[in-house]
Image: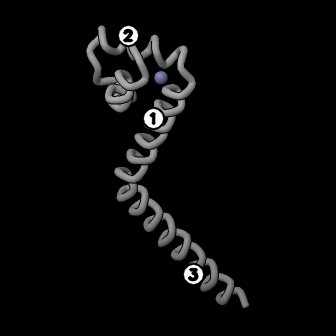
Amino acid sequence: MTCGEVQPFIEDYADNSLDEHTKKQVKEHIDICPDCQGDFDISVSLKVLLRAFTTEEPECDYFEKATSLIIAKTSSEASKSEEVH
Ligand SMILES: [Zn+2]
């Protein structure tokens, strides 16, 4: 396979959605071709980023909950220390 032949498959290869035969050919090329290896790395990184963005909502929610918990804790501690004084 040449770079031009491998390029259209790189994203699917990163997705692991290629059939075994094509996957083997793409892998064999990526193993010996630093250029396509680089493109493959970028594809994988983008997918990781994309996944991070997809799960952003629950993380935001978690962050909000954590923040309100911290605020609740801080204000209860503040009122506690007010009671002490
Ligand atoms: Zn190549």
In depth, the one of 18 and 81 nearer the eye is: 18
Disc 2 to disc 3, C-alpha distance? 60 Å
Q: Is mark 3 within 8 Å of ligand 1?
A: no
Closer to the chain start, of discs 1 and 3, is 1
Circle 2: residue type: Lys
Residue, x 30% and y 10% (percent of image)?
20
Secondary structure under the numbered disc 2 in the rendered image: helix
Give the side of residue 70 with respect to residue 85, left or right: left
Question: Tag on residue 24?
Answer: 2
Q: Which residue is mark 1?
A: 44
Circle 1: residue type: Val
Give the side of residue 62 with respect to residue 78, left or right: left
Determine crowd level at label 1: few under 14, some 14-19, many 20+ residues with C-alpha closer than 10 A: some
Residue 23 percent across, percent down from the top left: 35, 15
Residue, x 48% and y 19% (percent of image)?
30
In depth, the one of 79 and 23 nearer the eye is: 23
Q: Which residue is mark 3?
A: 75
Q: Residue 17 lies in what quarter of the image?
A: top left
Residue, x 32% and y 29% (percent of image)?
8
Residue 18 percent across, percent down from the top left: 29, 20
Please name which of the two marks, 1 or 3, marks the residue nearer to the observer: 1
Disc 1 to disc 3, C-alpha distance? 44 Å
